[in-house]
Amino acid sequence: MLKAQNLTKRFSGLLAVDNASIEVQQGSITGLIGPNGAGKTTLFAMIAGFLPPNGGSVTFEGEDITQEKPHLRARRGLARTFQIVQPFAGLNVRDNIAVGAYLHTKDPDEAKRQASLTAEKVGLGRELDKLASGLTIAGRKRLELARALATRPKLLLLDEVLAGLNPSEIRDVLPIIRQIRDEGVTILMIEHIMQAVMNLCDTVHVLSQGKMIASGEPRIVCNDPAVIEAYLGHGAAERIRSEGKANA
Ligand SMILES: Nc1ncnc2c1ncn2[C@@H]1O[C@H](COP(=O)(O)OP(=O)(O)OP(=O)(O)O)[C@@H](O)[C@H]1O
């Protein structure tokens, strides 16, 4: 469904993303992981059209969208959430979500009706009249999810929607993400919480220092020595192996 090939992004002297490729199969939940500063958000921004790449291409449903603006990608069904949640604080939950729904309707009543339905899906059905500024962090994360969902995406890019949540809040959100996929929305998610990656993702891609260093099933990728070293430093894979042997 999505193919990003050889994407490269330079910020003055810094090579933030270096010739990275990623494929997302329709109907999947695909994870993008990697240490802090690996380039994950930058890669997302290029896929969603918020940053122009210095090289490489993005193809969505067989069409080259590399030069296309974000709102046109959104019309094709490509939506993203942001790591830093940015609701319109002065609007209530319903109107915040309706902003997404306006992509497909000009009628305010219809946008609000769709917003209410979307709010139900993410567990915000009782908060519709609350100001976004009055929501908890967990509520704001759900709102961010709902705003993207209201655009009726085919592919949803989630940028750390679980960050800042406590374990019980995470447990509550995991089935919502799975349900969204079951309703036909393909998902590509940046996530640091490994429990979530293991639980949700069919495939995971690992970015380290701008380069894609591994891809595959989460359980296999997380045991890959190159991935362990990217997170824990050079020699870590060997240390873990020898500690394992010593404790056996
Ligand atoms: N607009 C920018 N201008 C200059 N440098 C940037 C810009 N955006 C990102 N960077 C740098 O590019 C690198 C990759 O950043 P990016 O935010 O994509 O990483 P990340 O993997 O999403 O990190 P994290 O997990 O911490 O969010 C970092 O070194 C970051 O400081």
Image (cartoon, grey):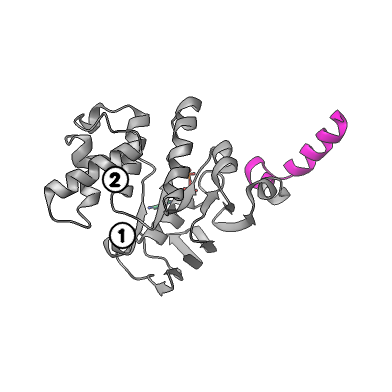
- For numbered disc 2, what is the local secondary structure? helix
Q: Earlier in the sequence, mark 1 or mark 2?
A: 1
Q: Relative to residue 167, is residue 234 drawn left or right?
A: right
Residue 244 included in the magenta stretch of the image: yes
Q: What stretch is highlighted in magenta?
A: 228-248
Q: Looking at the image, which residue is at 56% across and 53% down?
A: 209
- Alpha carbons under labels 1 and 2: distance apart: 12 Å
Quadrant assignment, res 59 = bottom left
In the image, is residue 24 above or below residue 157? below
10 Å neighbourhood of mark 1: few (<14), some, or many (≥20)? many
The residue positioned farthest toward the bottom in the image shown: 63
Which of the two residues, 139 or 213, is positioned nearer the viewer here? Answer: 139
Dot 2 amino acid type = Arg
Dot 1 amino acid type = Ala
Q: Which mark is residue 74?
A: 1
Per the image, the residue denoted by label 2 is: 147
